[in-house]
Amino acid sequence: MIEVIELHKSFGNIKALDGISFTAKDCKVTGIIGPDGAGKTTLCRILSCVMSPDSGDCFVDSLSCSKQAEKVKRIIGYMPRDYGLYPDLTVSENMDFYADLFGVYGKEKKERKEKILSAVRMDKFQNRRSGLLSGGMKQKLQLSCSLIHSPKYLILDEPSYGVDPVSRRDFWKLVDDISKNTTIIVSTSYMDESEHFDDMIILNKGKIVKNGTPEEVIKSVPYKMYRIKSDRLIEFSKKTEHFYKNMNLYGDKMHVVFDDKFSIESLKTDEFNDYNVEIEEITPSMEDAFIYFTT
C-alpha cells in the first residue's frame, strides 16, 4: 500500500502540492489526473524519492520516502515523463545498465530481460540504439527498464505523453497486465485513460479536488447535463450563453449545464425555430467531470 499524508511542496511562491493525502491500494491502478501545473510530476518525484517534500510524508510498503529513501527505491520502479535513457546505448545495453544498478545479474538478468522485451514486443530491436527508436518504442523501453528489478510498486509520470494512439493502446494493455501483481500510480492528462483506473484523484493547483472510482467521480457531478445539436451551433451557443452554468463544444455538438432558473421550454419558442435544435439529457463524460471540478 502507498499512503500519502499531508504532503506540501513549494517552489518559491508557487505551491505545487498543498497538503494532499490519499491511499493507493495494493495491486490496483490509481490514476492522477489534472491540468498542466496541477502538481502531478512533483507528486511522482516525491513518491519515487528523487525529490523531498517541504512537509508531510509518503509511505511505500510502510517505508518512509523521507527517512528510508534507499529502501523505498529498491521496491519501486519509476518512469519519468521525459525520456531519461541513454540514446547512444542500445535497447539491450540500457536494460543491462538498469539491471546492474539494482543488483540483477547473470542468469536472472538474462531471463528477466528476455521476458520483458518479449512482452513489450521489443525483442527484435535489442541492438538498436535507443535514440533511434520511435516515441512509442522509447516509452516501452523506459517501462522495461523500470521493471527489470521486479518492483512491487510502479510510478508512471504521464507515460503516454506524445505517443501515437496505437502505441498508447498497446502501452496500456501492458500496464493492465502488470497491475495484476503490482501497485501502480500513474499520472496523465488524457481523460480517456481513466477507463484503466481502479481509483482516481483529480489534482488542481496542488490540491485534491475530487477522488474515488471513475464511476463515482462522474456520478458526483451535481448537475444535469444536456447534449445540444444545432445546424448553426456557434451562433446558437452565443445567443443562449446566458442560460449556461457550463458549456463545452464537441465538434458539431455541445455539452451544457443550464442555469437553475432555465426551462427547456425556453428553446421551443419561435426565436429558435431556425436553429433546428436537438437536445437530450446525458450522463457526463470523464472530460465533462474533469472540467467541472477544475474550473
Image (tube, rainbow, N blue to C red):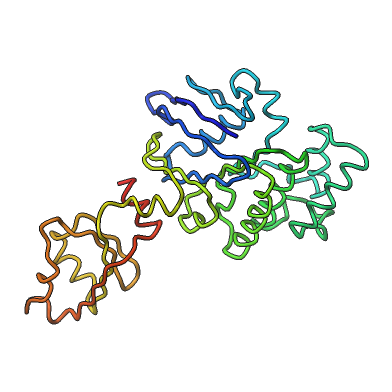
Q: As displayed, is residue 96 above or below residue 240?
A: above
State the residue in front, 62 or 143: 62
Quarter of the image with the N terminus is top right
Residue at horizontal 53 percent and vertical 49 percent from the top? 198
Quadrant hosting residue 78: top right
Q: Is residue 129 left or right of residue 227?
A: right
Extreme residue toward the right, this view: 107
Residue at horizontal 54 percent and vertical 30 percent from the top? 3
State the residue in front, 203 or 24: 24
Residue at horizontal 64 percent and vertical 30 percent from the top? 61
Quadrant hosting residue 259: bottom left
State the residue in front, 233 or 265: 265
Residue at horizontal 20 percent and vertical 67 percent from the top? 237
Q: Position of residue 194 (x, y in %)?
A: 49, 54
Q: As displayed, is residue 91 above or below residue 106?
A: below
Q: Position of residue 48 (x, y in %)?
A: 61, 32
